[in-house]
Each structure stands twice: as structure tokens, then as C-alpha cells.
Image (tube, rainbow, N blue to C red):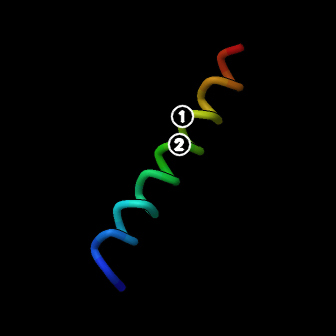
Amino acid sequence: MKSNDLVVFFQGICYHFDLGTKQRTS
């Protein structure tokens, strides 16, 4: 597993977490 893949994976989690937070507040 490349470090770049880890970054993309982490960004994906942050994106989905941010999306879920926005849906909860609205």
C-alpha cells in the first residue's frame, strides 16, 4: 500500500464524515 493511497483513503473518510455532518444539521 502506497502512502498516496492512504492519503486518498483518509480524504475519502473526511469527505463522507463532513457530508454526514451537513445532512444532520440541515
As displayed, is residue 13 above or below residue 22?
below
Label 1, on which residue? 18
- Residue 3 lies left or right of residue 13; in this view the side is left
Q: Residue at x 39, y 71 (%)?
A: 5
The quarter in which the C terminus is drawn is top right
Residue 6's disc number? none
**What's the residue type where badge 1 is placed?**
Asp
Residue farthest to the left?
3
Q: How far across and how far down the image is residue 18, in percent?
A: 54, 34
Q: Residue at x 53, y 42 (%)?
A: 15
Q: How far across and how far down the image is residue 20, in percent?
A: 64, 35
As displayed, is residue 18 above or below residue 16?
above
**What's the residue type where badge 2 is placed?**
Tyr
Label 2, on which residue? 15
As displayed, is residue 18 above or below residue 12?
above
- Residue 14 lies left or right of residue 17; in this view the side is left
**Secondary element type, mark 1:** helix
**CB of mark 2 within 8 Å of CB of mark 1?**
yes
Q: How far across and how far down the image is residue 13, in percent?
A: 51, 53
Q: Residue at x 65, y 17 (%)?
A: 25
Residue farthest to the bottom?
1
Q: How far across and how far down the image is residue 14, in percent?
A: 47, 45
The quarter in which the N terminus is drawn is bottom left
As displayed, is residue 7 above or below residue 25?
below
Give the total of numbered labels. 2
Q: Around disc 1, counting alpha carbons within 10 Å, would you say few (fewer than 14), some (14 to 19), or many (20 or more)?
A: few
Q: CA distance from mark 2 to mark 1?
A: 5 Å
Please identify the quarter of the rendering in which residue 24 is found.
top right
**Secondary element type, mark 2:** helix
Q: Around disc 2, counting alpha carbons within 10 Å, would you say few (fewer than 14), some (14 to 19), or many (20 or more)?
A: few
